[in-house]
Image (cartoon, helix red, strand yellow):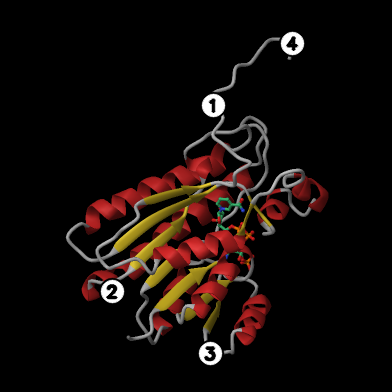
Amino acid sequence: MTQKTALITGASVGIGEATARHLHALGFSLILVARRKEKLDKLNSELGGKHAVYECDVNDKGAILTLLEGLTCDVDVLLNNAGLALGLDSADKSNWDHWETMINTNCLALAYLTRQLLPKMVARNRGHIINLGSIAGTYAYKGGNVYGATKAFVEQFSLGLLADLMGTAIKVTNLEPGLIGGTEFSNVRYEGDDDKASSMYTNCQPLTANDIAQTIGWLVTQPEHVNVNRMEIMPVCQAPAGVSVYKEGS
Ligand SMILES: NC(=O)c1ccc[n+]([C@@H]2O[C@H](COP(=O)([O-])OP(=O)(O)OC[C@H]3O[C@@H](n4cnc5c(N)ncnc54)[C@H](OP(=O)(O)O)[C@@H]3O)[C@@H](O)[C@H]2O)c1
């Protein structure tokens, strides 16, 4: 069997790093993308140094094109994982720069990379695009405003890709996790306030990056005729717990 290649954005830490480790163990060749090259280099050397490493801000369209033009192999799996949440303020008090960064990174950069890579997948009639959505794209929560909206975009974009690619062998999956601990996600959201970030995970057992990596490993090893369109995955301690009612004075 020929070796498959996975391009992973946001491979420096968290879900991307855990998935890189797992896909490496499954025999994949990897293209590791993130801004912190030193972390990618360290990961690559731990994995035997045989993977490709690209220091790249996914918001830099020129850098994305350079990366894609420089590839010497075809991409079988595109894991659009790079993404972030910034802040938890109410919409009327939110920081506009935060909103722009989330929309740019979670929506525009993901769409741009997909758009640039897709023609080759179509020409080969082969490939699997896995987008990191979130339960935030389905269930609203206070302060989730634009982050949730970006993940709703990712979900609908994934479904749109599936519609467009019907008749090809290309797979598309929107993976929608809930609370995941042990990544930098909350540290980034709270801009380095690590106490606040870690308080998200006290007295409960969140998912781990490795849980998601294992799930992705399962997704990419399904038979050729099987596509998982959407997958929502939460820790047992979490549930979509319904609609809230505001009571005066509370
Ligand atoms: N953690 C959760 O609870 C959770 C739940 C549902 C969905 N998700 C989604 O899962 C994905 C990964 O989250 P995570 O928990 O693993 O977060 P994380 O630990 O903060 O990792 C985020 C990754 O994205 C990369 N990244 C961010 N902005 C980038 C940019 N402009 N260019 C290139 N790379 C960039 C970071 O690398 P550099 O900083 O080195 O560039 C890092 O590798 C995100 O899309 C997130 O929305 C997370």
* Label 4 – label 3 distance at C-alpha: 61 Å
Residue neighbourhood size for the residue with mark 3, other residues' Cα within 10 Å, grouped as few (<14), some (14–19), many (≥20):
few
Label drawn at residue 249 = 4
Can you tell which of label 4 and label 2 is closer to the viewer? Answer: 4
What residue is shown at x 23% (from left), y 59% (from top)? 165
Q: Earlier in the sequence, mark 4 or mark 3?
A: 3
Q: Earlier in the sequence, mark 4 or mark 2?
A: 2
SS at circle 2: helix
Residue neighbourhood size for the residue with mark 1, other residues' Cα within 10 Å, grouped as few (<14), some (14–19), many (≥20):
few
The type of residue carrying mark 2 is: Lys
What residue is shown at x 56% (from left), y 48% (from top)? 100
Can you tell which of label 2 and label 3 is closer to the viewer? Answer: 3
Left or right: residue 53 compared with residue 6: right
In the rendered structure, are the residues bearing label 4 and label 3 in contact, judged by CB atoms less than 8 Å apart? no
Residue wearing tag 3? 50
Which residue lies most toward the left here? 167
Residue wearing tag 2? 120
Q: Is 190 or 76 nearer to us in this picture?
A: 76
What residue is shown at x 57% (from left), y 60% (from top)? 211
SS at circle 1: loop
Q: Is 233 or 80 nearer to us in this picture?
A: 233
The type of residue carrying mark 1 is: Gly
Label drawn at residue 242 = 1
Residue 192, image quadrant: bottom right
The type of residue carrying mark 4 is: Gly
Residue 172 position within the rendered picture, expressed as x and y whole percent measured from the top left: 34, 59
* Label 2 – label 3 distance at C-alpha: 24 Å
